[in-house]
Image: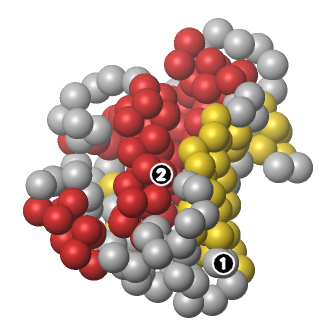
Amino acid sequence: MERTERQEKVDIIWQQLCYWEMIANTLIHREFTSSYTAKFVIEKDRMYTENANRSSGDGIITPDNMEPNPKNPIIASFFRNIGWSDRLGSGVRNIFKYSKYYSGEEPEFVEGDVFRLIVPLNEDYSYDIKNGDKKTAIKNGDKKISKKTIQNYKKILEFMEEGKEYTIQDFCNLLNLKPSRTKELLKALTQDIEQIGNNKNRKYRLK
């Protein structure tokens, strides 16, 4: 859907992707011999799951250090066969990818005997992206991101959905910005955009 139709990504992510990824994670990776009650809790500023786990270690999981390991490979295979699950590890990458755009913070995947997945929520942040008319700055950790900057991020990603390769001038024309400022915006999107070539021949495309 994301690559074939132009629609608000807020709706896709929070209503479909995040909820489903969190629930699928609970079912595929649960330690079913445990009597620990699985939880999916939605609060004002976060939603989280707690789930019995056959832990292979302890600590925080990120896209850089994760080692996909289905605790229940038969269930994982069944979900993939019916089209309700993607390749192993895709859920972690998906939630990390979009969380920063729609809550301003990264999620937490905490490995242990009880596995915890915590996704931050920020109604002001989501409202700003969806409506584009909120004037307050948005805090991202110690850095504030303006409404205009977030709108530019969104314009860039939507502009690139056709899958072509684009020059810096293409983005300058799109955003009506100077090359120096445009390069700053593209640099912040390195998780989604890759560079091809160098210097004057440099182009950009979606990963």
Instruction: Identify the residue shown where x is 33% and y is 76%.
Output: 72
Q: Position of residue 70 (x, y in %)?
A: 37, 78
> Which is nearer the eye, 158 or 25?
25
Instruction: Identify the residue shown where x is 56% and y is 66%.
Output: 35
> Which is nearer the eye, 134 or 20?
20
Which quadrant does the N terminus fall into?
A: top left
Q: Is residue 81 left or right of residue 47?
A: left
| Mark 2: few/some/many CA within 10 Å (<14, 14-19, 20+) | many
Decide if residue 181 is in sight here.
Answer: no
Specify the label residue 60 is tagged with: none
> Which is nearer the eye, 190 or 176?
190
Q: Position of residue 40 (x, y in %)?
A: 57, 45
The amino acid marked with disc number 1 is: Gly
Instruction: Identify the residue shown where x is 59% and y is 36%.
Output: 102
Which quadrant does the C terminus fall into?
A: bottom left
From what the image shows, is residue 48 above or below residue 138?
below
From what the image shows, is residue 73 above or below residue 137?
below
Q: Which residue is mark 1?
A: 112
From what the image shows, is residue 183 above or below residue 129?
below
| Mark 1: few/some/many CA within 10 Å (<14, 14-19, 20+) | some
Q: Residue furthest right?
A: 142
Q: Mark 1 falls on what kind of element?
A: loop
User: In which quadrant of the rendered view does residue 205 lie?
Assistant: bottom left
Q: How is the image coloured?
A: secondary structure
Q: Is residue 3 left or right of residue 149?
A: left
Q: How many marks?
A: 2
Q: Which residue is mark 2?
A: 22
Q: Mark 2 falls on what kind of element?
A: helix
User: In which quadrant of the rendered view does residue 24 lie?
Assistant: bottom left
The amino acid marked with disc number 2 is: Met
Instruction: Identify the residue shown where x is 38% and y is 36%.
Output: 16
